[in-house]
Image (cartoon, coloured by chain):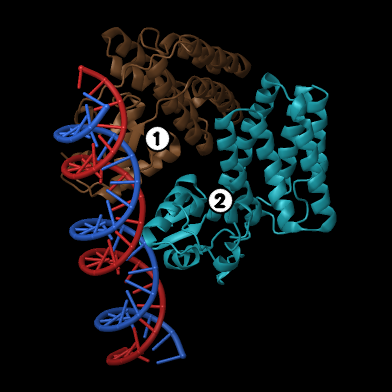
Chain colours: A brown, B cyan, C blue, D red
Amino acid sequence: MPETKLTEKQIYERIWRSIAERRLPPGTRLKEERLCEIFGASRPRIRRALDQLTHDGLVSHIPNRGAFVTTPSVDEARDVFFTRRVVERGVIDALKKHGAQDKLAALEAHIAEEREALAEGDTARIIRLSGAFHMLLAELAASPLLADILRDLVSKSTLVTAVFQPKCDTQCGPDEHAAIVAALAAGDFDTAKTAMDEHLQEAERTLKLEASSEGNILQDDVLGTALSEG
Amino acid sequence: MPETKLTEKQIYERIWRSIAERRLPPGTRLKEERLCEIFGASRPRIRRALDQLTHDGLVSHIPNRGAFVTTPSVDEARDVFFTRRVVERGVIDALKKHGAQDKLAALEAHIAEEREALAEGDTARIIRLSGAFHMLLAELAASPLLADILRDLVSKSTLVTAVFQPKCDTQCGPDEHAAIVAALAAGDFDTAKTAMDEHLQEAERTLKLEASSEGNILQDDVLGTALSEG
DNA sequence: TCTGCAAAAATTGTTAACAATAATTGTAGA
DNA sequence: TCTACAATTATTGTTAACAATTTTTGCAGA
């Protein structure tokens, strides 16, 4: 499918997005040769992309066995959400410092899009937009480092929910996002911080972090379909 | 020097530490061939290690030019310290949640070591221990994610201070660390958080973030000496 | 003497072939 | 029929050679 030669960063990005948007579920095997075919790249190029993903913790690498999409443990799941609370409180702090009034339009537009996806029942889009809201907030906060860190955490959250939220019922909802934006609009950053904190705690509560359902490791050829689009 | 074959992770760690402990200052060129000689490894292995460091932001990679130890900009310097304040407040939160009483001995032992290094005027050791204190705190907080994130931030701080603190005078001091530990010992986590925050603000204040002294890019063969020990 | 161009040297980027390790499958024995 | 062992297969890990690009050096001309 890719006619033009892809840079290794593009390969990394494509795989990253496929994982973050849950098209490649935890446990999926990432066979190097197969990825070569898909991207039309040689093996070392693929390998470099996988190395980066392993470094990020999104991919687990077993020596002489290969690479797999990471399946988070219960402890890791809790840690992801705890760390997100820490970081996203910091995002609100950064917005307070840097001023948030000029960014409300973009946030409200995003929420409108979320509501639309929810109305249409477009699950894939809902997942993508839920994460994107938090990323948007971080990018508006003018702290590239916090944004990078959160990007990592959001993608890990996706893995966590894929494993510990068998029912795709209560996804990260637009209403809770709207509450955060409303507080920002009012200039009430303490309320915004509290709303964010509760939003993340609520998201964590919807998970079933006791009974680990270790059973959705499908081993079909999902790679081809999952990585098709950029 | 390395008789046994080093794994690429060990190579990564060695270079990482050399940067984090300021033996490889910002702007240093990391020539692949030279690194091959030093580590007795083939070029692709070295390259993988450099890729990871680039991903971390410690190394800047210019296409067809090579790899250099990153020279942070003023904006990046401010962002590093802002982000550290966010993350390290989170570390204190984690300690509160997880209990800190059983960890005081290790912290106090560390501070004693810092005082010793300061008394002896062992600059390299002071730099190493200053960063290690914050890392120790993060590791005791039982949040692997926060610890990983902070590890990154501490090493970036080293680059920042290398560039913006020409006088190696007021390093991250033992007394301020002691104040944090004292608050933890008293179970007063709010005070600990405030002490941490002020400690980091103070560290940022000692930097000269206006006049960028772009002049300490020595191009000797520092690689050999800097990377000698593990 | 200084500037601009061209050629050579050095360094990185890429690919392809080779070696080593682990998983699987088939077979023999109990 | 089940288990243990061995050979095969598949996949990853490594190395070495090749190609492309950039920088430097040398030279000619103003």
Q: Decide which of B84, A227 is in the foreground and name it.
A: A227
Q: Is residue A52 visible?
A: yes
Q: Mark 2 points at which residue?
A: B73
Q: Can residue A228 be seen in this view?
A: no
For residue B132, which quarter of the picture? top right
Tell me the quadrant of the picture where the C terminus of chain B can be found.
bottom right
Residue at image coords 37%, 18%: A162
Marks 1 and 2, how far apart in space?
34 Å
Q: Decide which of B222, B44 is in the foreground and name it.
A: B44
Q: Mark 1 points at which residue?
A: A60
Tell me the quadrant of the picture where the N terminus of chain B can be found.
bottom right
**Outermost residue toward the right in this view:** B119
For residue D5, side relative to residue B183 (left or right): left
For residue B94, which quarter of the picture? top right
Q: Position of residue A176 (x, y in %)?
A: 47, 10
Which three-letter amino acid code belongs to the residue tagged 1? Ser
Which three-letter amino acid code belongs to the residue tagged 2? Ser
Q: Mark 1 packing: few (<14 Cα in 10 Å), some, or many (20+)?
A: many
Name the chain letter of the residue that bears numbered label 1: A
Reply above or below: C2 against B74: below
Q: Where is residue A119 in the image (x, y as percent from the top left)?
A: 30, 7
Residue at image coords 67%, 21%: B98
For residue A226, side relative to residue A76 (left or right): left
Q: Position of residue A205 (x, y in %)?
A: 50, 9
For residue A133, which quarter of the picture? top left
Name the chain letter of the residue that bears numbered label 2: B
Q: Mark 2 packing: few (<14 Cα in 10 Å), some, or many (20+)?
A: some
Which of labels 1 and 2 is toward the front? 1
Task: Determine the secondary structure under disc 2.
Answer: loop
